[in-house]
Amino acid sequence: MVCDTVLSDPDEVNALIGKPTDAVHAATMLHRLSGRRHQVWSAAGLLVHGTWRYFVEYAVVEMDELPDETLVDLVLNDSWKGKAGGYDLAGPMGQFARVIDGDSTTVLGIPKEALDVLNSIVG
């Protein structure tokens, strides 16, 4: 299985937000997402008995307005590293953001349908 996740830019629907390259980039991303809704897209490829199956899903996340102190804490704790949009919904950001449409597994990086197929094979 291979997976990756990107966010739709809340200001430009045809632009994507990937992973931050450093702490300043993470702070900029989080500041842009603060108090707003955005789409999170996850795609996966799953090799099942020699045949690749592909899955793409999105979810909508709403983020609280983040005070400066919270932004600083989120950046300093390094929870942004390797995360699309600079946050991990299963980590510290979970108390400031919520999925309002779609499935949380999509936001965490695995389309729900791909997870369901994988569970049916393993389970």
Image: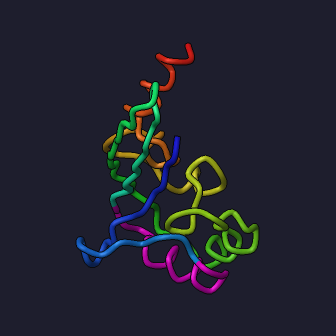
The spot of residue 109 in percent (x, y) is 50, 48
Picture quarter containing residue 106?
top left
Give the colouring mode of the picture. rainbow
x and y, in percent, of residue 99 in the image: 41, 46
Side of 7 relative to 78 (left or right): left
Res. 9 image quadrant = bottom left
Residue 31 within the magenta-colored segment of the rendering: yes
76 part of magenta stretch: no
Identified at 38% across, 56% down, the residue is 40
Please identify the dominant SS of the magenta region. Answer: helix
**Magenta range:** 21-38
Image coordinates for residue 59, horizontal then vertical, percent: 34, 48
Residue at the image position 49 percent from the left and 49 percent from the top: 3
| Residue 32 appears left or right of 21 | left
Identify the residue at image location x=26%, y=77%: 12
Name the residue nearer the viewer: 97 or 40: 40
Residue 89, image x, y percentages: 55, 51
